[in-house]
Image (cartoon, rainbow, N blue to C red):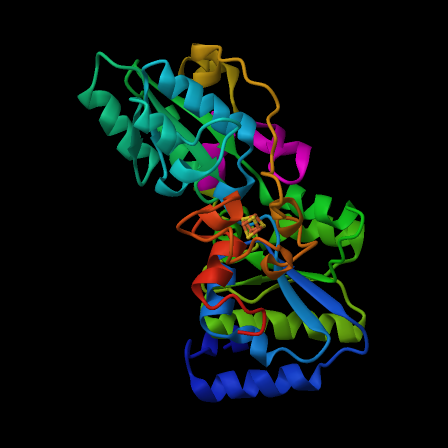
Amino acid sequence: MREADRLALRDPARARAFAERLRSLRPDRLVRIVHVCGTHEIAISEHGLRSLLPEGVEVLEGPGCPVCVTSTRDLDRAVKIALQGAIVCAFGDMLRVPGTDLTLEEARGLGADVRTVLSAADAVEVAWANPERQVIFFAVGFETTAPGTAAVILDAPPPNFSVLAAHKLIPPALETLMELPDVQVDGFLAPGHVSTIIGAGAYEALVRRHRVPVVVAGFEPLDVLYGIVLLLQQLRQGRAEVENAYPRAVTEEGNARALALIEAAFEVGPARWRGIGNLPASGLDIRAEHATCDAVQRFEVRVEEGDETPPGCRCADVLVARATPADCPLFGTACTPVAPVGPCMVGSEGACQVWYRYGGRPTL
Ligand code: SF4
């Protein structure tokens, strides 16, 4: 049995053993590991894993919070559609993300019908229950949530239902981080849930092109520690490979059925990422044969490229791992989960909100 399979997921003895291994892998230069997953950040912050890192190793969250990376343009579009009288269904975290003028929650305060749902299928139920109204599902998230949206598009939804598609793809975002100025990435901790869909093999091209190690990791504290150990081992040995530290859930090829759903409903296209900008081939557009389900076609709403970052907010840097939440002067003072300034404090997976929830200290 492989080591990752034997993990007793919260075994203190194994945690101590990993901490020892981490200490033995102390680098002789600053090493920055980037993960792209709010759930990883929660595991790291909640369990104080940064306190186990050897000197010279930093772990930062990149563009891993789907709410945070949703552009103001897409949000403004959802707000305008809601103000036109349609029912807009969205995940709860989306309601307080700032748009150019309004959040969805503020639009609701002005009389718009904005509803919280847990899935695309829930939004379809709203459409069946309100045949006289237009119902839009605001589809955000990465490869993890895209199959659910694809499934409803392909399953003959009611004629009053459409999708405002803002799904994004993780591998192109990782490619971009490698090319941004002033962003140091020495290794990626790849997200376990996205990887269950796309497979560990999806990172091979990135590794070949940039010679950067990638380790797919699960979400238990020991999964994360094990992933960091493997990354530091690769760096020490001068290797750059994809390693799968989450084999109990992730295969090399991914989930063929989910990938087929995505392929049938969407085609890969450019996407606008908050804090990063327009990235080619990093989003999912609804295929022309399903255009009747495309809210952009149905509503023809015009929006400008809005300001992505409120004044003083460093989300744009936090989202590309150029800064930590603590580097922002507004963190924990003018900006808190009760009164968030930027999207990284709104999303429950946003780095700023996670750091605030668990004490707001990088060493916690
Ligand atoms: S603490 Fe608030 S203002 Fe600062 S980067 Fe985070 S979300 Fe933006």
Q: Quadrant of residue 278?
A: top right
Q: Judge by depth and name the residue closer to the eye, 272 or 328.
A: 328
Region rendered in magenta: 258-284
Give above or below for 255 relative to 331: above
What is the x, y in percent for residue 156? 32, 20
Return the x and y of residue 255 as percentages of the image width and height: 47, 47
Queried whether the magenta region covers residue 263, the answer comes back as yes
Q: How many marks?
A: 0
Q: Determine the residue positioned at 51% across, 20% down.
A: 287
Q: Residue at x 48, y 22 (%)?
A: 77
Which residue is nearer to you in this view: 21 or 355?
355
Query: Can residue 266 be seen from the camera position used here?
Result: no
Judging depth in this view, the residue of 67 and 216 nearest the camera is: 67
Q: Quadrant of residue 308?
A: top right
Q: Is residue 328 magenta?
A: no
Instruction: Tell me the residue at 35%/29% (across/down).
Output: 152
Q: Is residue 92 left or right of residue 230?
A: left
Q: Residue at x 44, y 86 (%)?
A: 12
Q: Nearer the viewer, residue 125 or 350?
A: 350
Residue 90 in the image: above or below residue 195: above
Q: Is residue 358 visible?
A: yes
